[in-house]
Image (cartoon, rainbow, N blue to C red):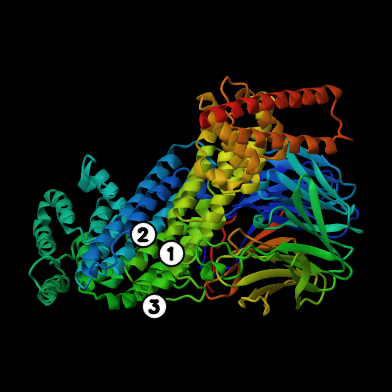
Amino acid sequence: MEEVDVEPAVTNIPAVGDKKHMGFAWGPGDILVYETLYQPPGPSGSVFPFIHEVRKDEDIYSPILRKLFNESHHIFVGLQTIKEDLPSKSKKPQFVSISKNYRSVIRACMEELQQVAISTNDAQVATQYGNQVSILLAIELIWNLCEVLFIDAAPAGSLLLHLLDWVRLHKADVYEKAREVLHSENPAEHPDYWDVVVSYVLQGKLEEVRQMLVKQATQQPAARGMYNLMDTLLSKMPYYNPGGTQTLTEFDVKWRHWHDEVDRCVQDNSFASNQHLELICKILLGSEDTLLQCKDLLSNWYHFLVTRLLFGHPTVKPTELHYFAQSSINMFLDSRTAPEPLDSILLAAFEFDIHQVIKDCSIALNNWWFVAHLTDLLDHCKLLQSHNLHFGSNLREFLLLEYASGLFTHHSLWQLAVDYFDHCPEFGRVYLELQIERVPLETERKALKVLRICEQRQMSEQVRSVCKIMAMRALRNNRLGSALSWSIRAKDAAFATLISEKFLQDYCARGTFSDLDLIDNLGPSMLLSDRLTFLGKYREFHKLYGEKRFTEAAKLLLSLMTAKIAPRSFWMTLLTDALPLLEQKEAIFSAEQTYELMFCLGELTSSLNTAAPGTDRSMQEEDLEVTKVELLRLALARNLAMAIVKEGTVDT
Amino acid sequence: MVSVINTVDTSHEDMIHDAQMDYYGTRLATCSSDRTVKIFDVRNGGQILVADLRGHEGPVWQVAWAHPMFGNILASCSYDRKVIIWKEENGSWDKMYEYTGHESSVNSVCWGPYDFGLILACGSSDGAISLLTFTGDQQWDIKKISNAHTIGCNAVSWAPAVVPGSLIDQPSGQKPNYVKRFVSGGCDNLVKLWKEEDGQWKEDQKLEAHSDWVRDVGWAPSIGLPTSTIASCSQDGRVFIWTCDDPAGNTWTAKLLHKFNDVVWHVSWSITGNILAVSGGDNKVTLWKESMDGQWACISDVSKGQGAVSTITDTQQNEQ
């Protein structure tokens, strides 16, 4: 961990020349830096053609920490759904259990890291993971203390019991040592025997102490009496039972009584002949000097603090903690050693200065995960309300945004970040809007995922952007159907027109439509652009024709021209399509419809004639066109005759 | 943690002047005094040269990626007075358009927000700013603001396509009436804001604070507040943060971010606009963040070091 409130850290980039500058650019997540020269062109000397990608929040990319991010995400989302209106009394156990869940995720992750650090052969990886373990250890330690002090907020009496648990959990090496001693051939003779006994005393594990002492007593029959006396003292030490009927005052009286008894033993020099038992007795008395002699076994000031409270002030109130903490730190650390960041953070916690804790953690620990989640939890416990920030957003949101922004740069974790942004009422949405457009849409599936996220949140601009990108990409890959459906989703009329045009060109060239399913099911989206409407209707004509519903087909075909839905360039194709209908045995076009068809043909040929000079169509094409027109004229005339006869017949 | 995660050897034969990641961080475009523009595929820490674009006849100053909804399009500008727009078609990169309307070096190119279609602003040493708009069918519409900055224009940067405060005032679902705006900085020591009205570009604001050439300007992304923010840096060593809370966009106030001991060449905002990166004659890139009490603090510093890459933990946040 680093010192708190330091100068910004420096990252060094390899480079050459002295008179060169550092150029940079933002990537979506990383920063690019390179050597450059901003001055006008001139001799630039030696060139260093490298571009370095610099990344913040590299933790995000650790495969093991990914589990931490994933699992804590579930806990986070669960926490957000706790009902606001529940009475705070029934919410507290929930918050405590959520806090414990977070801690167990940290522990699991820590254990896994430890395993990897031990099993790897790569020294660099081992160091890296070792560092991460020590950071997670510190995080868990701080979190646990915050849980005891802020979330559980245990009152006098229970407070000490919780602190004792806290110290025991984080000073677990005693148990390993104890196991080693107990499994040795002769535990009482083991060199670590007394260290284990004293460590147990310091942690208030007096039952264990008694069991250990029995082993010693049996070997020293002469000292039996002394051991018995110690056993009685140990067994009689009162513990507060928060669930019981005893009041705190009653406990206090009882405790004082026991304390006097210990004091008498010291005064009487009951254990003078055995230095170990005498040491234990003085610890039980709460002698600070004696405790300080055990510095090595206590190993840190907060263990000292808790042991000091256990044997000196077991009914300590939360408000008195800061006094004991400060004095413990002063007594424990000699004046030459400056407190480390972790010490300051724990001290701030003992002072109930939540904001200082969060602030110092943000600076000292190099990850946002911890501060963001802890602050969120504390905010739900209504512990942060007094702190309104000028920055426009509250502390909780500020930290969550930082954390989630880091997640967003990761190729798969970005999906977790979405939920975090969702729970930032003020800026979450805009952050999400800005970030989600940077998610690479490598596959259709990923695009649909991004799209769903945007649609669920009514981010219409982003939906449009994603669809347009996908439409453009499909077009570039010549997948017309996909391009069309994306541009319909994007409601991009110009692009839909462009693609419809391509479909029609395709049809003219090959005589068949691709992506029939799509075109057949356009429905109302057909109205997005005129050309798309035409495409849809034209396909409908083919369908009717295929189903031999000639009258309807004929009517539709005609209306495409008369209602000006079909582009003029396509009329000849439409008229050619009319030919087989005109040549049916029965008249399908009525006389009136035939007149209209003739009018269309007339209009088309006159415009063709005027446009004819200068066009570079080959003679062959020209001939073909002329033949087509003649064929049409003939067919129209025949049909007209048939229709008149038919209509006349019906009339009479 | 701030650490170097990847190093790309561009093999440029002369000084690199700009490097830009595409929208997704998957491709890197670089340009150099060796007159080339190169494109690398940098996915998964790789570095595959995708294109080596030759067409400029002088040092290439800047490159800019267009939004991916327009396809894969890159603009470059050069000392040779040209702006070239490159486009990838069927896997190969080719010139899509070449603009030769400037009479001197073109120093800066910047694509407008995608809401406006393909529109490119170019700032030149001839003092003019050109706006190139794609109108379809390989046609580009050109508008030129002559004498935008006396002696020369050094930088251009577009405003986000939002009416300030629109996310608060606008009824949902209704598309706000976007106004095209951008900021420029030049050798007249001025920062100028430009606005399109009835198809014509007009000077909207003139921001005076710098005492020497303005080297770069950056308009911050909108984060939904009715505030516009611009950063500017200058040869005078100063970096200013300009803000405007007024919906009409008329009242801008300047706040000095920092006075450096040397020329400040480049400023740029992160995607969500919460971090400003600054680089100057002191051979450093510093990252600045507005803390919760509205003060700007330097949070990290990327410097030139000797020899091997060293990784140093950074302070993540400074609330003071």
- Please give the label number shown on residue A141: 2
Residue at the location (70% across, 37% down)? A600
Mark 2 vs mark 3, foreground winner is: 3
The residue that label 1 is drawn on is A342
Element type where label 1 sits in the image: helix
Asked if badges 2 and 3 are on one and the same chain, I answer yes
Q: Pointer 2 indicates a residue of which chain? A: A
Asked if badges 3 and 1 are on one and the same chain, I answer yes
Name the amino acid, label 3: Ser
**Front residue (pair A338, A87):** A87
Q: Earlier in the sequence, mark 3 or mark 1?
A: 1
Percent coordinates x, y for residue A406 in the rendering: 52, 54
Contact between marks 2 and 1 (CB within 8 A): the answer is: yes
Label 2, label 1: how far apart the Cα atoms are: 10 Å
Mark 3 vs mark 1, foreground winner is: 3
Name the amino acid, label 1: Leu
- Please give the label number shown on residue A386: 3
Element type where label 3 sits in the image: loop
Residue at the location (41% across, 45% down)? A67
Name the amino acid, label 2: Leu
Asked if badges 2 and 1 are on one and the same chain, I answer yes
Label 2, label 3: how far apart the Cα atoms are: 26 Å
